Image (cartoon, helix red, strand yellow):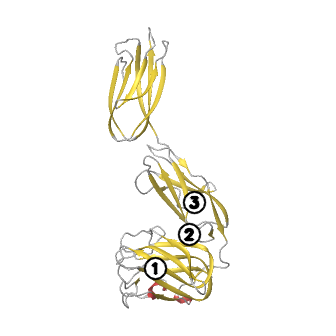
Amino acid sequence: MGRRTGTITQTLSLNAGSYALSFQAAQRSGQVQPIKVTVDGTQIGSLLSPASTSFSSFSIPFSVATTGAHTLTYTGTDPNDRTTFIDSVTLATVGASTTTTVASSLNASTVGANVTFTASVTGSPPTGSVNFTDGGSSISGCAAVALAGSGNTRTAQCSTSALTQGTHSIVANYGGDANNTASASPPLSQVVNTGAAGTSTNVALASNGGIASASSSYSSGYPASAINNNERAGTNPGNGGYWNDATPNTFPDWVQINFNGAKTIDHTVVYSLQDNYTSPIEPTDTQTFLLYGVTDFTVQGWDGANWVTLGTVSGNNLVKRTVNFSPYTTDRIRINVTNALNTWSRITEVEAWGN
């Protein structure tokens, strides 16, 4: 901006957020004159020009709540005064401060169990990515996880089954963006226990002695035996590819697997039907569904007289959903489905890991 006096008006297109106005001003002679600053007609500050012939810098912060055109004015006390000159005005974006937190899907967990860390970043609104670290080092595959969601709070998730025994210091580091400052979560102490002794085995498999049953089955093409045949993708739908209950829009529905004797287990994996079920792929830890999955369920173990809830899942959207819990000894488990998408409960496989 050239050397001007009196009132200066600028109409700028600004994104919602925080800014700082920086002025270069000089007072040549006569009385010292303050500079009044307004944004959209509201005064945000008054800067006193220097009582010398040298240049001086001033800075004043402000914010706007909406994106669009905003009018900024800079006015001397006497618009006709020729003693105070505004030599330049610079507008800089100041990132909104952010807060980041991190939570664990299971704490304590066990060696080999899958744990999901969820970072929540609150800003204006934040974009960018999160780096999940364990003791200061990035967790494999989680160095730059993009934020997802909408609004001023967005999330990123990191899943890992590689944590060793002990206590881990987990931190979610948000890198910031053009409108938001970087921030880091307070450290989360993730405890990892040894879990069940010995090598972990999928004790639910039919080949390992598991016997599956269900509350109901739509037909012989959708049997309970589909859930422990070691085929997780749900291939051959309608011909043993997955289990489908027989009570439309009525819950709960359940599937049960009796083990070949008492087993000590520490996590189960429940696989839902994929959206593209006619051309399914081997499920991954991050694959999601929108159409046919089970959204709410509990994992239960039999104590000899009653079903005991080992884990509860709500709002699920993962095709492959791991549920971790403290080691539990039982001879059977049950997946009790309390809600699912598109009329029916559909499960392609259930795994129970232990020995």
Where does the C terminus fall, quadrant-wise?
bottom right
Q: Amino acid at mark 2?
A: Asn
234 left or right of 132 in image: left
N-terminal of the pair, mark 1 or mark 2, is: 2
Are the residues at dot 1 and dot 2 in contact (C-beta closer than 8 Å)? no
Residue 303 in the image: above or below residue 172: below
Where is residue 37 shown, x and y percent of the image? 40, 26
204 left or right of 49 in image: right
Q: Cα distance, mark 2 to mark 3?
A: 13 Å
Q: Residue 232, labelled with which disc?
A: 1
Residue 145 in the image: above or below residue 214: above
The secondary structure type at the circle numbered 3 is: loop
Are the residues at dot 1 and dot 3 in contact (C-beta closer than 8 Å)? no
90 left or right of 193 in image: left
Q: Residue 139, labelled with which disc?
A: 3
Which residue is the extreme one toward the front? Answer: 305
Residue 2 in the image: above or below residue 264: above
The residue at 47%/71% (across/down) is 284
The secondary structure type at the circle numbered 2 is: loop
346 left or right of 110 in image: left
Where is residue 72 shown, x and y percent of the image? 35, 29
N-terminal of the pair, mark 2 or mark 3, is: 2
Q: Residue 329, labelled with which disc?
A: none
Q: Amino acid at mark 1?
A: Arg
**How crowded is the residue under tag 2: few (<14 C-alpha within 10 Å), some, or many (20+)?**
many
Report if residue 174 is visible in the image: no
